Image (cartoon, rainbow, N blue to C red):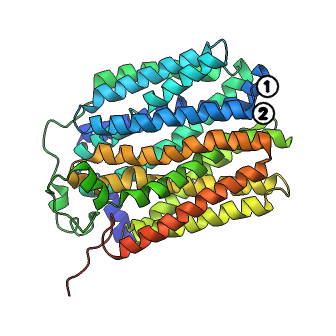
Amino acid sequence: MKQANTQRRQLFSGCSFLQMRMLALCWFAYIFAYLLRMNLSVAIPVIKQSEGYSNTQIGLLTSLFFLTYTIGQLLSGLLGDHLRSKPLLVTGLLLSACCNLGCAFSSGLPMLFACWILNGFAQSMLWGPLIRTLSLWFNARQLERVSFYMALSTITGYACSWGLASFLSERLGWRAAFWLPAVLVLLFAALLLLLFRSTPQRPLPAQEHEPGLAAEAPRSLGDPSPVVPRLSLFAYLGRICFPVLFLMAAAQGLVREGVGVWLPTVLTESGYFPADSLWFVLLVIPLMNLAGVLFVQKLLRRAGQNSGKILFFLYILITAAAALLFFLGGSNVILPLILMVLLLSVTYGTGPIFTSLIPFQLSAYGRVSLTAGLFDFSIYCGAALSGAISGALSDGYSWGTVYLFWLLAAAVGLLAAVAWFFFSKRGTAPGSKPAKAK
């Protein structure tokens, strides 16, 4: 235990001031990005009440956002490996801020749709370049810890966005939940223009060659050497068994974003949690999401970063929670709240495996931005399905039907996780050990 604590304290001991500054800028960049995307979830009950929109209309709005987000992830992922990260990042934040300003001053549903759909494309320009930047600024052993900190940025951004949007919607109306975060992000984008650097000017410290660290550095796909021949796109997708990963990530996105978008609405429609008393949920959910990330990180350390084993276990938990929500969710409001918070916690803990850990482990292939973009694309393909279908099912049937939809998605993810587990055992998955020759 003492040795592990010493290693954690020394992890960034050889980092320069510029490296730590870049980590801080990337961390805050994604927090500010969340201010411009999760604000809609909290504002939905107020928007429905003041504007008279239905769950089907709002669900379609969120699905179209995720649709443009997924398409943009492919484009920005491809471009991110060839272009400098700074222009993509600053452009994405500026465009997202302008879209939020458009939502704030929209005069009807068409303008709200247009601005929020474009916001999905703007948001897609952020994660891939951020991950590529970090892969250039930190070496292999450091990136394991960096992925943990970036996972915390999504949770912190989630909490800040929900808290700020809830406060503004209650005090100043739902439009303030869009224009004030946009102003804050415009100021932060100016700071990025001054301080952000896409690549380091000097070579990284050779920490992965220090005694004791090389043996612990995360490996990927048969433990490749630092220099790996560049594969064609289709060969690369086959090498990482992307169809199976796509199903797992899409299931995770469908459940996570489905619960995240509709949880405030479920609670307000229950009558037990009025729109102006969601502070309790806003306090508990980010803490539970943080607990989920910490839980998954601990599992990964114990399993030696074996993604197959951990994802298999996590999807068992997700499917079990979704099954309980479907079969027992109609009894009272407290049990669905507990189960949906549990689903959010586990799915948020699972996300960094896809969006940070595996792309970092595959950095030797020179496609970090593309890999991060592909996983985000997969996650938000599921999210795009979740928004519209969940909204339509809740209007046409009941929330129990929505819970069944989430359960089916979790079951598909579990089946994919079983397949990925067997690939891991054969030494063909990221983070697994190569098979020994007999």
- Dot 2 surroundings within 10 Å: few (below 14), some, or many (20 or more)? many
| Horizontal side of residue 290 vs 77, given as left or right | right
Pick out the residue farthest to the bottom.
438
Whole-percent x, y for residue 91 in the image: 36, 23
The image quadrant where one finds the C terminus is bottom left
Residue at the spot x=35%, y=61% of the render? 241
Whole-percent x, y for residue 187 in the image: 43, 19
**225 is higher (above) or lower (below) than 418:** above
- Residue 142 in sight here: no
Residue at the spot x=33%, y=76% of the render? 426
**Residue toward you, 109 or 293:** 109
Residue 181 occupies quadrant: top right
Q: Are marks 2 and 1 in contact (CB under 8 Å)?
A: yes
Residue of label 1: 49
Q: How many marks?
A: 2
Residue at the spot x=33%, y=66% of the render? 429
Q: Amino acid at mark 2?
A: Ala
The image quadrant where one finds the N terminus is bottom left
- Residue 222 in sight here: yes
Whole-percent x, y for residue 353 in the image: 42, 56
Q: Nearer the viewer, mark 2 or mark 1?
A: 1
**60 is higher (above) or lower (below) than 206:** above
Residue 30 occupies quadrant: top left
**226 is higher (above) or lower (below) than 133:** below
